Image: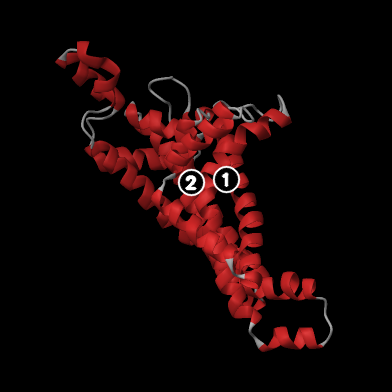
């Protein structure tokens, strides 16, 4: 297992390099730069050129990136030129907010999606049709639109949940949980239906196999047949979809954090892009890429846990 983890981590190194390099290049191609943003409209040409030299923007783009990469490998992501704080000190406090949303999305997708998928496979009828209908709704309406609808209904009209803001767990666990309900469901709504549809299709395939009939013939309780044996054999394609859903949820958190005014990595990424703060944006990109690597690694480890044949290969 250690060799598998090490192999996956080594394979992820090119991904990290490519993603951060593309972010660096695309940011340089955007109109304006950090020196122009800092000086504003009142800066002179001489001040602009002097600031570009001070920030190192006059160097070739590849040299700038390699310099950043060399420091990043040593754990130094640089200093934000707007706040004058280190990038890691800006990112680390916000990491918990984004991770809380991601973990919440994972729990909701697994619990609700699996239950709906199993119910649809065993009963069919209106449950299956409802899942298909909700899937179409999720495709039509993006997460940020759904977030506004949820705010209007549950925060403004019913006043059950807070509309915006974030409460840290150390301050009040109850308020922390309440502040995450709407953001989590805004991201997870479409993902729930994706997991449910995949679970339904996989369960329909597994429930017709010979070993299920043999287990029933041996007198095994139906609950054990479904939840212990059938669901585990149907879980591999579900885990694959879940990994894709969680990676897609990373981009969903960027919009949701802005809508709900959450101090997470997504909202910080938007601010860094608007301010042309390339070092801060590079740091956020690196964190999001590492989160993607972690999700892929957990999916691979889940394959090995669910299927010993995959583990041995």
Pointer 1 or 2: first along the chain:
1
Residue 91: x, y in percent?
51, 32
Residue 51 rendering spot, x and y as whole percentages? 26, 19
Q: Specify the farthest residue to the top.
A: 42
From the viewer's perspective, is residue 186 above or below residue 32? Answer: below
Q: Quadrant of the N terminus?
A: bottom right
Disc 1 crowd rating (10 Å Cα; few below 14, some 14-19, many 20+) is many
Few, some or many residues within 10 Å of mark 2 (<14, 14–19, 20+) = many
In the image, taking residue 274 as reference, residue 157 lies left or right, namely right
In percent of width and height, residue 122 lies at 66, 72
* Quadrant of res 251: top left
**Residue at (47% x, 61% y) in the render:** 11
* Residue 227 in the figure: left or right of residue 279: right
Along the line of sight, which residue is nearer the eye, 41 or 17? Answer: 41
Which colour assignment does the render follow?
secondary structure
Residue 246 percent across, percent down from the top left = 52, 53
Judge whether residue 197 can be spotted in this image.
yes
Q: Quadrant of residue 118?
A: bottom right
Question: For mark 1, what is the residue?
Answer: 102
Q: Is residue 68 left or right of residue 157?
A: left
Question: Is the Cβ of the residue at disc 1 closer than 8 Å to that at disc 2?
Answer: yes
The kind of secondary structure element at disc 1 is helix
Query: Residue 101 versus residue 72: which sits nearer the camera?
Result: 101
- Label 1 – label 2 distance at C-alpha: 7 Å
Direction left: furthest residue: 45
Q: What is the number of the mark on residue 119?
A: none
Helix, strand or loop for disc 2? helix
- Quarter of the figure that contains the C terminus: bottom right
Q: Is residue 299 above or below residue 158?
A: below
Task: Tally the numbered discs.
Answer: 2
Q: Which residue is mark 2?
A: 250
């Amino acid at each position: 297992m250690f060799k598998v983890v090490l192999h996956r981590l080594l394979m992820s190194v090119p991904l990290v390099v490519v993603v951060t390099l593309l972010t660096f290049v695309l940011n340089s191609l955007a109109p304006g730069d950090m020196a122009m943003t800092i000086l504003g409209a009142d800066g002179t040409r001489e001040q602009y050129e002097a600031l570009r030299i001070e920030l190192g923007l006059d160097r070739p783009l590849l040299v700038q990136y390699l310099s950043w990469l060399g420091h990043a490998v040593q754990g130094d992501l640089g200093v934000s030129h707007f706040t004058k704080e280190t990038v890691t000190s800006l990112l680390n406090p916000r990491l918990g907010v984004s991770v809380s949303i991601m973990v919440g999305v994972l729990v909701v997708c697994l619990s609700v999606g699996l239950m709906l998928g199993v119910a649809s496979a065993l009963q069919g009828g209106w449950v299956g049709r409802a899942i298909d209908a909700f899937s179409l709704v999720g495709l039509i309406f993006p997460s940020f639109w759904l977030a506004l609808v949820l705010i209007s209904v549950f925060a403004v009209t019913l006043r059950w949940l807070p509309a915006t803001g974030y409460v840290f767990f150390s301050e009040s666990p109850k308020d922390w949980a309440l502040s995450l309900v709407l953001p989590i469901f805004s991201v997870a709504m479409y993902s729930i239906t994706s997991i449910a549809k995949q679970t339904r299709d996989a369960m329909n395939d597994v429930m017709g196999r010979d070993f299920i009939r043999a287990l029933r013939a041996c007198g095994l309780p139906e609950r054990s047949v479904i939840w212990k044996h059938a669901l585990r054999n149907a879980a591999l394609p579900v885990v694959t979809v879940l990994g894709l859903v969680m990676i897609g949820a990373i981009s969903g958190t960027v919009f949701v954090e802005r809508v709900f005014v959450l101090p997470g990595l997504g909202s910080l990424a938007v601010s860094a892009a608007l301010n042309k703060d390339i070092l801060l944006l590079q740091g956020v990109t690196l964190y999001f890429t590492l989160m993607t690597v972690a999700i892929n690694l957990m999916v691979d480890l889940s394959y090995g846990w669910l299927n010993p044949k995959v583990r041995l290969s």
